[in-house]
Image (tube, rainbow, N blue to C red):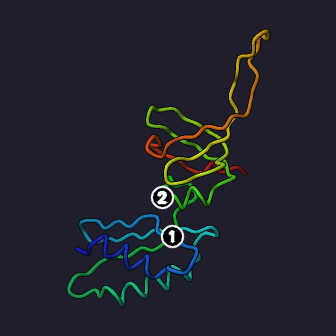
Amino acid sequence: MLDRNAILDFVSRQIEGTDLFPVDVTVSPDNVIVVELDGPAGVDIDTCVNLSRAFEEEFPREPEDYELEVGGAGLTAPFKVLGQYLKNIGREIEVLTADSRKLKGTLTAADADAITLRREVKVKVEGKKKPVIEEQEERIPMADIRKAQLILNF
């Protein structure tokens, strides 16, 4: 079985100098290798084909055969790396926190430690019967994010 870290290192070298970044590399027990890439403009088919060809030159199918899939991270797939958060700043996302809160809002900032989400919150105002909707920004530590993904609006 091929080593995941060796594959990730190879992929990182191949996309060096581009705006692409690796999202995930998985190697199943029966040698099915899946390489997911992403970038600000997405991933085109030519990039996937070129990476597949370079991969087969670097890792010959002899003595160990494998199945290789190279593609972009799906639009509806959960975010796995910081680059995906940075790519989607200004877009609406949904976040499931470690304490099972489901938050929807606009991603306004992201770094290795946390993301900032601008969302509408109902606030009880003294002297009024009905709550008022206010926009608030909430900083959510990366360690508290169980799942985050883009909300597609058509």
Q: Position of residue 151 (x, y in %)?
A: 63, 48
Give residue 148's position: percent from left, percent from top.
Answer: 52, 47
Whether pointer 1 and pointer 2 mark residues with C-beta atoms closer than 8 Å, the reply is yes
Q: Is residue 54 left or right of residue 154?
A: left
Report the Cα–Cα distance between label 1 and label 2. Answer: 9 Å
Question: Going 58% across and 36% down the picture, which residue do you hit?
Answer: 103
Residue that appears at 70% across and 33% down? 120
Q: Is residue 97 left or right of residue 56?
A: right
Element on which disc 2 rests: loop
Q: Nearer the viewer, residue 53 or 121?
A: 121
Neighbor class of circle 1 (other Cα within 10 Å; few <14, some 14-19, many 20+) is: many
Is 13 placed above or below 149 here?
A: below
Going from N to C along the chain, the mark reached first, 1 or 2, is: 1
Q: Which type of secondary structure does the marked residue at label 1 adopt? A: strand
The relative height of residue 26 versus residue 120 in the rendered view (above or below) is below
Q: Place residue 111 in its image quadrant.
A: bottom right
Residue sitting at the far right: 128
Disc 2 marks a residue whose amino acid type is Val
* Crowd rating for badge 2 (residues with CA inside 10 Å; few <14, some 14–19, many 20+): some
The residue pinned by badge 1 equals: 21
In which quadrant is the N terminus drawn? bottom left
On residue 74, the disc is none
> What's the mark number on residue 81?
2
Outermost left residue: 63
Q: Residue at x 42, y 87 (%)?
A: 54
Residue drawn at the location 29% of the way across and 65% of the way down: 28
Which residue type does callout 1 highlight? Phe
Q: Residue 113's spot in the image, x, y percent?
A: 49, 49
Whether residue 79 is situated above or below residue 19 in the rendered picture: above
Residue 95: image location, x then y, percent: 54, 42
